[in-house]
């Protein structure tokens, strides 16, 4: 692993616990409006639209569009599908901005601080720059640089997303390691020549999670969290 | 100034002392090759080609090109103009990479750490991402995010350079402050609606500097260094 100069991180699920935070935001708005709703189901439905909503951009049918805008469109669909008309425009905007305020898993901030000593650390996320900056300030994520969708102008798992991020650092893909809790993200990264590290996040989708419960290939590193990743990388 | 959420920094001259560092690199290579050369004059000649080399990109006659490549082209011109053929390809590449290793003025690292507590801090430089990341690691510059030429796909002082950087943060120009040691940079930033802070760097061009020795307009803040800037911004 001595050839690895930079660690590129998936963010949603790998760095931050989106489901707990988005569920709490729905629950808070329900209480404020004195209505009942299934907060975690709404969070799951919102997230379920995430991958499909990027597809038109990946295949070139829609110009590059920031995730904030996709999140807003997807929220409108979820609310309409659940006949939820009570939320004001300001409340919907606040929900969209909730993705800027997601909290890191407990090991993340300290783990990143250790990893930063030996490596360039950067998010390689589908999130837009402002989302990732605001999240970093709130969750104490000491990134060296913010890479991701707006820099590479496409969405993972397109190979260009990984290749352009490494190129922006002036590095070959072989000198960069993708860190993710998702086997499909790592597979796409490895296909571009990147090194790979699998992180186990077995409650990302709640207590009944059915996927990404184990590494599904011989990734270069497997770790249960960022502390163990730092240990295994000698940081 | 309570409306300011982000501070965007010019880098060459404002954050780092390029002339001292580039002069030292020329002097080191001269000693290694046992030749005589006027190191500071070569540094000045190299830097003098900086602005003209970006002009074709600003006016659209050349596609966007990273500063690393412009620096390499400009170095070749300077060496040829001085009949300096002694440097190997590896030595020329090392000189180009010297811009990744520039050292900050003495007040910079501590000043940025203080400013970071209250503001998003980011370079808005003509430097490319890898240059700015490597510089930040070496000179301990705790940026929240790296903005600049590669993000905005043009060079200052084009108005789009400032406007797109603010937009990437999800902010209006009025909520961002440009920090620079150069009056022309601040004028261009103010014309887009940004707030402005002038920093006095009266030895950027050596002991006989003739320009930017004082603020030439009523900038929102004038400070002698980043410590005084932090004081004036209440950090």
Image (spheres, coloured by chain):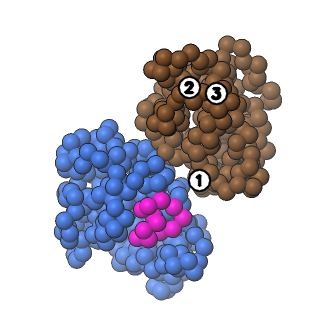
Chain colours: A brown, B blue
Check whether the beta carbons of the residues at disc 2 and disc 3 lie within 8 A of each other.
Answer: no
Eye-nearest disc, 1 or 3: 3
Q: Does B165 lie within the magenta span?
A: no
Q: Is residue B136 left or right of residue A221?
A: left
Query: Which contiguous range is marked in magenta?
Result: B152-164
Can residue A83 be seen?
Answer: yes
Question: Residue B170 placed where, x, y %?
Answer: 46, 48
Choose the circle earlier in sequence order: 2 or 1.
Answer: 2
Subunit that carries the residue with mark 1: A
Question: Residue B92 placed where, x, y %?
Answer: 54, 70
Eye-nearest disc, 2 or 3: 3
- Find disc 3 in the rendering and name its residue: A83
Subunit that carries the residue with mark 2: A
CA separation, marks 2 and 1? 26 Å
Q: Secondary structure at mark 3?
A: loop
Check whether the beta carbons of the residues at disc 1 and disc 3 lie within 8 A of each other.
Answer: no
Question: Residue A71 placed where, x, y %?
Answer: 60, 39
- Find disc 2 in the rendering and name its residue: A22
Choose the circle earlier in sequence order: 1 or 3.
Answer: 3
- Local crowd at mark 3 within 10 Å, few (<14), some, or many (≥20)? few
Q: Does B158 lie within the magenta span?
A: yes
Q: Is residue A187 left or right of residue B96?
A: right
What is the number of the mark on residue A151? 1
In front here: B189 or B75?
Answer: B189
């Amino acid at each position: 692993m001595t050839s690895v100069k930079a660690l590129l991180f998936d963010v949603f699920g790998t760095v931050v616990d989106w489901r707990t935070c988005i569920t709490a935001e729905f629950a808070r708005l329900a209480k404020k409006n004195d209505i009942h709703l299934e907060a975690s189901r709404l969070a799951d439905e919102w997230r379920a639209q995430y991958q499909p909503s990027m597809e038109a951009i990946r295949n070139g049918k829609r110009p590059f569009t920031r995730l904030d805008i996709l999140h807003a469109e997807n929220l409108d669909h979820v609310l309409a599908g659940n006949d939820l008309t009570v939320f004001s425009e300001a409340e919907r905007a606040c929900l969209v901005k909730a993705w800027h305020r997601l909290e890191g898993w407990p090991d993340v901030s300290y783990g990143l601080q250790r990893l930063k000593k030996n490596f360039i650390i950067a998010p390689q996320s589908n999130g837009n720059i402002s989302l990732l900056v605001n999240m970093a300030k709130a969750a104490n994520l000491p990134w060296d640089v913010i890479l991701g969708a707006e820099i590479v102008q496409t969405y993972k798992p397109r190979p260009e997303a990984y290749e352009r991020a490494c190129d922006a650092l002036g590095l070959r893909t072989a000198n960069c390691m993708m860190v993710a809790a998702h086997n499909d993200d790592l597979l796409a990264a490895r296909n571009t020549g990147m090194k790979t590290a699998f992180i186990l996040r077995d409650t990302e989708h709640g207590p009944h999670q059915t996927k990404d419960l184990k590494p599904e290939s011989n990734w270069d590193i497997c770790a249960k969290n960022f502390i163990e990743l730092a240990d295994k990388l000698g940081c």
